[in-house]
Image: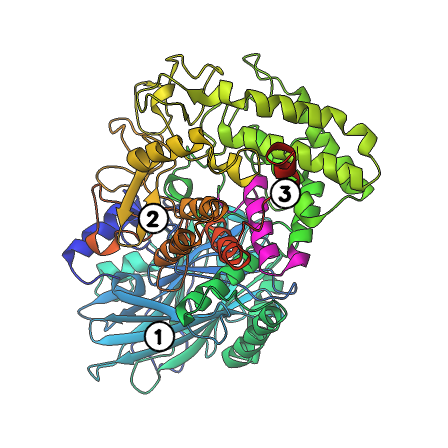
């Protein structure tokens, strides 16, 4: 929302230095003299000046994320900054557009996009169904837009209502920036059967309006697109082009609205493999109408939620219960429909991942599947009562396992590896999820044993053997990490237990032997007794060499051009040793390490106490507020902010300490970070510049919603209800704490 110059500056800073510092310009429009013109102006000719400015995506701080519950509708939408931002089609790893929004002008004195003015997002359906209403205001006008998908087909329906507050007629245009197949620089655009079609080699979209378009045009971004023409000519267009592309094309159609006698219209964005299919889809959704589609959309979600247990009793207030429902819905909506069980991390592309082709030559990276995040999502949905979803997640992991037994760093929803580094915890977490599900059938065990054998045989390029990992859970460093080692130990013990249940117990000895050896050795790899933070032993974030008392130096990787002593860097990853049953909650090294973590990397905000990932983390905005980008020729420092997931991890630890009161407070702290539509973020603002005072403790321009955060909220809520962490592997605790 923009209410003053300070917020205008902040929004520009958060969005970054690209053309998206102001909402992205969109395609040109042919002009008619009045909104009620009876004969549509016909565009003609081909737009010159291609291919246009390179495509970049909207910021990651979404205020809406929706899809139907049906497989027949493989399309998802997001909202950000007063507009519909990315849509996804035909799967959740494939953005299909960059943004769709309105432009409103009086044709004389002002031209404004919805994303330029004040905007408020709120739910518009009952019971937590993910339909949204955007309320916007500008110079003498107000607009309300509502968004759902058609449960019967691949389309997004937008109910548009625009009113003039002065009595003067308005002109209303809809802007659409396609980015089919995840690539916005190779699309072609043209009119077809009264719709505005875009296509590439793999997919097509069709933009249609209930009463058709009075005029329309296509053009190239920042060259001759409609927004550029309208903004430079007082709401008038000099050119109306029929075709453009291939390139970064943008489409504009003028709606038959004047804000006075004509105030409401339905707009549909339909998709298909070919242009004709996209046009049919859009027109069928138009015939169905927004209200009918929204009703079916709402019923589908209410039916799903009605089949789950009610929210746990510890969530007493309506707002707490609403956030719980929103978390279930967010996780459920994050599952791909063509690839069941493939849940993505977030429907967003934070910072440079959406704008920098050097960092992300192919769109990424959060709308991918991480085995680690999928474990959190699966256990979150399992806690909420959706056992079927957790089983689908497990099945997807079995399908996406690589031939040598490990899981890639992340992969597309169809299982294709994207980033290919090795993280041993991502090969461990499928075993933990399988144990939670009691999956000891022969097929599951065959896959899990391949993963365990990969871990046992692993040797790094430097010559270190497992549990040394080429990357730990923050994906930036190799070494001996307490959190990674914890997951590997627990995974091997859980696998051995599953093998016993599946009649393969005689083969489990080698896994238990390795787990026991690592459990005995982990302090020697990761606990410093001479580090700068305490005279007593404490856990390090990681060691590069398994020598925690050595002053080995390494670069953190995000925010410094120098090296740091490994003994100076701490995180709270050692809490995984307690959560996974390897160390007792009152272990003196654990307790001392917590004191250091609270002193060194915690921050108090209006939404409670939160923690950074580790000392000196730089995965966040630059000091001037510009987006994180690893390729910074001059500015080396960036500020990683606080992550709400750590409040959940601390709450689980406190439950294991018997401190239910403190754990309840952690749940409230997570809830306090939610945005206006109950989206939970990856990171929240702290007190370092550029600090927006009204946003301290609320989401930054990091990934929002983040599935991991929502899953952590669900798990902690049910853990409070049951008195102990719901994903606690008792078989591990029995071996190391009670054996």
Instruction: Name the residue at the front extreme.
Output: 738
Q: Is residue 74 magenta?
A: no
User: Could you give the CA–CA distance between mark 1 and mark 2, rounded to whole angstroms?
Assistant: 25 Å
Which residue is painted at 29% across and 35% down in the image? Answer: 599
Q: Position of residue 328 (x, y in %)?
A: 53, 61
In the displayed structure, 23 sits above or below 374; it is below
Q: Name the residue tied to disc 1.
A: 144
Which residue is painted at 24% across and 27% down in the image? Answer: 634
Looking at the rendering, which quadrant does residue 628 occupy?
A: top left
User: Could you give the CA–CA distance between mark 2 and mark 3, rounded to whole angstroms?
Assistant: 38 Å
Q: In this rendered view, identify the residue nearer to me: 597 or 631.
A: 597
User: Could you give the CA–CA distance between mark 1 and mark 3, rounded to whole angstroms?
Assistant: 52 Å
As drawn, is 640 to the left or to the right of 713?
Answer: left
Q: Name the residue tied to disc 3.
A: 730
Range covered by the magenta-colored residues: 366-389
> How many labels were placed on the picture?
3
Looking at the rendering, which quadrant does residue 5 occupy?
A: bottom left
Tell me the element at label 3: helix
In the displayed structure, 222 sits above or below 312; it is above
């Amino acid at each position: 929302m923009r209410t003053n110059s300070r917020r205008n500056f902040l929004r520009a800073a958060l969005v970054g230095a690209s053309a998206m510092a102001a909402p992205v310009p969109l395609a040109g429009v042919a002009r008619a003299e009045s909104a009620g013109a009876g004969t549509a102006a016909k565009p003609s000719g081909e737009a010159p000046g291609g291919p246009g400015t390179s495509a970049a995506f909207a910021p990651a701080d979404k205020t809406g994320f929706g899809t139907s519950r049906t497989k027949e509708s493989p399309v998802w939408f997001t909202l950000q900054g007063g507009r519909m931002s990315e849509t996804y089609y035909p799967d959740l790893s494939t953005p299909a557009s960059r943004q769709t929004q309105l432009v409103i002008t009086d044709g004389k004195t002002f031209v404004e996009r919805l994303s330029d003015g004040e905007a408020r997002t709120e739910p518009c359906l009952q019971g937590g169904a993910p339909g949204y209403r955007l309320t916007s205001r500008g110079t003498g006008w107000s607009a309300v837009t509502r968004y759902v998908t058609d449960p019967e087909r691949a389309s997004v329906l937008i109910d548009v209502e625009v009113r003039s507050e002065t009595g003067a007629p308005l002109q209303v245009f809809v802007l659409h920036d396609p980015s089919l197949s995840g690539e916005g620089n190779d699309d072609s655009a043209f009119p077809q059967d009264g719709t505005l079609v875009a296509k590439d080699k793999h997919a097509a979209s069709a933009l249609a309006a209930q009463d058709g378009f009075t005029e329309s045009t296509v053009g190239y971004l920042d060259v001759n697109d409609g927004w550029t023409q309208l903004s430079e000519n007082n709401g008038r267009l000099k050119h109306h082009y029929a075709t453009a592309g291939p390139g970064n094309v943008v489409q504009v159609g003028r709606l038959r609205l004047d804000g006075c006698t004509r105030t409401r219209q339905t707009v549909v964005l339909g998709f298909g493999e070919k242009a004709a299919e996209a046009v049919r889809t859009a027109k069928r959704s138009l015939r169905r109408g927004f209200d009918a589609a929204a009703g079916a959309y709402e019923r589908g979600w209410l039916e799903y939620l009605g089949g789950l247990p009610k929210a746990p009793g510890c969530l007493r207030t309506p707002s707490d219960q609403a956030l719980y429902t929103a978390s279930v819905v967010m996780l459920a909506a994050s599952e791909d429909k063509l690839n069941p069980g493939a849940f993505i991390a977030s429907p967003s592309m934070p910072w440079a991942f959406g704008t920098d082709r050097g960092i992300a030559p192919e769109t990424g990276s959060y709308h991918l599947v991480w085995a680690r995040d999928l474990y959190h999502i699966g256990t979150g949905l399992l806690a909420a009562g959706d056992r079927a979803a957790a089983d689908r997640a497990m099945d997807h992991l079995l399908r996406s396992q690589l031939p040598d037994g490990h899981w890639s760093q992340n992969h597309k929803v169809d299982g294709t590896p994207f980033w290919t580094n090795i993280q041993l915890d991502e090969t461990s977490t499928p075993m933990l999820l399988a144990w939670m599900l009691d999956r000891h059938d022969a097929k599951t065990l065959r896959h899990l044993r391949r993963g365990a054998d990969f871990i046992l045989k692993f040797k790094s390029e430097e010559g270190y053997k497992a549990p040394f990992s080429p990357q730990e859970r923050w994906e930036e460093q190799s070494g001996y990490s307490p959190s990674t080692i914890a997951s590997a130990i627990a995974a091997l013990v859980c696998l051995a237990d599953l093998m016993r249940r599946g009649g393969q117990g005689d083969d489990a000895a080698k896994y238990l032997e390795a787990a026991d050896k690592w459990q005995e050795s982990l302090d020697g790899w990761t606990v410093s007794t001479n580090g700068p933070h305490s005279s007593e032993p404490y856990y390090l974030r990681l060691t590069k060499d398994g020598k925690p008392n050595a002053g080995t130096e390494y670069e953190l990787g995000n925010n410094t051009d120098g090296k740091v002593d490994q003994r100076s860097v701490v995180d709270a990853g050692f809490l995984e040793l307690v959560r996974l049953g390897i160390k007792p909650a009152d272990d003196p090294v654990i307790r001392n390490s917590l004191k250091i973590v609270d002193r060194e990397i915690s921050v108090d905000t209006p939404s409670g106490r939160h923690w950074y990932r580790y000392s000196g983390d730089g995965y966040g905005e630059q000091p001037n507020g510009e987006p994180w980008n690893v390729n910074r020729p001059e500015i080396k420092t960036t500020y990683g902010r606080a992550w709400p997931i750590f409040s959940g991890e601390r709450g689980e630890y406190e439950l294991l300490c018997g401190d239910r009161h403190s754990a309840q407070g952690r749940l409230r702290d997570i809830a306090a970070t939610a945005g206006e539509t109950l989206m939970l973020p990856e990171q929240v603002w702290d007190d370092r510049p550029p600090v927006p005072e009204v946003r301290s403790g609320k989401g930054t321009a990091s990934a929002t919603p983040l599935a991991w955060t929502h899953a952590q909220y669900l798990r902690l809520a049910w853990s409070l209800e049951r008195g102990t962490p719901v994903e606690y592997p008792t078989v591990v605790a029995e071996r190391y704490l009670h054996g």
